[in-house]
Image: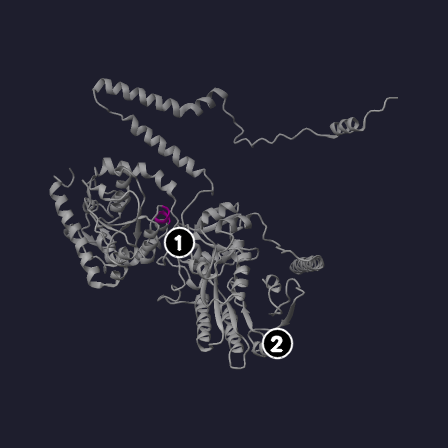
Amino acid sequence: MARRLATQVPSLFGCDVADPVSAIEEMDFVHADTRQSVIGKLVRQLRIDTVVHMAVTVDSAAEDRLAHETNVIGTMNVLAGCAGPSSPVRRLVVKSSQAVYGAAPGDPSFLTEQVAGSDRPAYGLKRDLLEMEQLAQEFSLRTSGCSVCMLRLGYRVGEGTKLGSYLSLPIVPTFAGFDPRLQLLHEDDAAEAFVRATMGAHEGVFNVAADGIVLLSQAVAIMGGKAVPMLPPYGRWLGRLALRAAGVDLPEHLTDVLAFGSVADCSSLAAAFGWKPAYNTRAVIDSLARGKDIEVIEAPSPPQEYELQVYLQRRRRRERNGRANAALALRR
Amino acid sequence: MTVEPATALASKELRRRSRKAKVVAPPRASLLRLPKPIRRLQRRAPMYAIQGINGLSTRLREMTGREVIDMNRVMEVIQFLYRQGELARRGPNYLVDDFGFDAEWTESFLSVFKVLYRDYWRVETTGIENVPATGRALLVANHAGVLPWDGTMIKTAMFAEHPHPRHVRALVASLFMGMPMLSWFLRRTGQTVGHPDDTRRLLERDELVLVFPEGVKGTGKPFKDRYRLRRFGRGGFVSTAIRAGAPIIPVSVVGSEEIYPMIADFAPMARLFGLPYFPITPMWPWLGPLGMIPLPSKWRIQFHPPVHTETHPHSAADDNHLVMTISDEVRNTIQKGIYDNLKLRRGVFV
């Protein structure tokens, strides 16, 4: 996403706790943690007018405490940094997720932006995301000079995502008696949506997800696996434990999606942005099946390309060594 | 000394080095392979069987003077089995619509439901011409019988009687969408959650939508009240129809009331399984799975003339008085239709 933005804005600053995967010439990078209030100083000193807040973890089975810390407290700090009369921030783009709807049998077949936060009690990630969105809403109400855009990204199945690794299993355990509709989002489309939201002036909440659906059984068959309905239909935590034993640590909200499905209505995105994701759900699954998502390098200039390849190679080697050391340690 | 051209040498050399292409044959299923004539017989057995049945049917017709084995029926069964086999082998490249409806798969079951329709419940359908061949419409029907066989039969009636068969998309209580197997089957055959938003979307796609405003209160009504309609929700279906500009077609179904005569409702069991009711019938649960077989009552389905809600402006959907008036009108039409059809029916089982 940063690579796409770099050509369109005068200056770009990145900010993360870890090193960036690839270096971008036009981007300056700062190590910072949203859990501390450094964002305010950064924004004021560098006279930043647009903040894109993406430090929201959705696809992690880590304990709720940590996710809460990142999602809610982190967002709170970012918003606090952007608030105030001395703040130069005029635009804020916040990443959210389709997980904010959860998944339940009584949901309408297509979730519109207004459905979220209905009467059902929310817990875990869903509650965090709702709280986070609420913070952003309050922020947009309080600061009149800043327009806020929230993107609820659909479920992604890129390399390294939990759902992706679940679908890539050779034998995919599914919940017995359920074959939900899946709606996915390609990583490229997610990045493109963010670029458009950053450059545009749309206000409000938007669903971002691919067109169309596939059934879970179809998706598994396209991936070349075999769907075996062997998880118990009741007691989803039991299924989650079984999956963990099989090597896939699914986050809690995804188990509901794998039973009841969750499909968002993206018509308001299409109306406001005049754009919709280029990949439909079927194409997302197909591209995952072809394994084309492993290393996407978008039109890099040759020296960068070289640098990137070297970096990736080094990282891979480091990982391999790490694994070998771990194996050695185990053997000892 | 003659010099061979380089190409010839190369090709010779190539031929020398080349190996024969490896023949990749599918692995043999078993070591013991039956002799060829027997395998041929296996392959042709279905054909011989059909010919045999055909011969038997002709013989019996000549002997008794009437149709004992109906060859059309036999062919239907064979077609059904063949189609199921085809569907099982079609792989993941089939289309479902955004609601998860698989039309091809659903149509493969129609022959089974048509047998139930014609021979088991001997359904007589009137007023099918009131259902439009194209465009949106909202079918509103009474709901009775413990399991929703009435919905199935209305769907089948559209295929068995209507000159332009269409799929009817029924709305289901969210409770059933949370049940294993049932949720899968219902979605696959075109049903969706009974949510106003879903109704609107289906109608805007010019679909034929079936709704049971009585809901589970209708299917769970005791046997003594079987012909009396329950409350029609809060008239939500009327406001949805007005908003979508769809005509409402009331449908009266008679006969579904007797398929499972529910004597009592064993509430503790229902609470245990999270069901709306746990029926006690003369057969269920005493006979086990056999008790699930519905009784062969005589059915009548009547499609009434449409109530034109599309003449009202959109703002009328918020007019509670108008909505409740139309709702009551539809309810009275259906109730009257039930009594009319009860008079036309000679007996419960004939």
Extreme residue in the bottom direction: A85
Quadrant into which the C terminus of chain B falls? top left
Residue B214 placement (x, y as % from top left): 22, 55
Q: Nearer the viewer, residue B63 or B200?
A: B200
Q: Nearer the viewer, residue A293 or A102?
A: A293
Residue A76 placement (x, y as % from top left): 50, 75
A44 shown above or below A206: below
Q: Which is more foreground, mark 2 or mark 1?
A: 2
Please give the label number shown on residue A46. 2
Q: Earlier in the sequence, mark 2 or mark 1?
A: 2
Is residue B49 shown left or right of residue A166?
left
Label 1 marks which chain's residue? A
What amino acid is labelled 2 in the image?
Leu
Q: Is residue B187 magenta?
A: yes
Name the dominant secondary structure of the magenta segment: helix
Would you say the residues marked 2 and 1 are in contact, meaning their CB atoms lie under 8 Å apart?
no
Q: Nearer the viewer, residue B195 or A229?
A: B195
| Range drawn in magenta | B184-188
B43 shown above or below B149: above
Is residue B85 shown left or right of residue B66?
right
Q: Residue at x 24, y 36 (%)?
A: B118
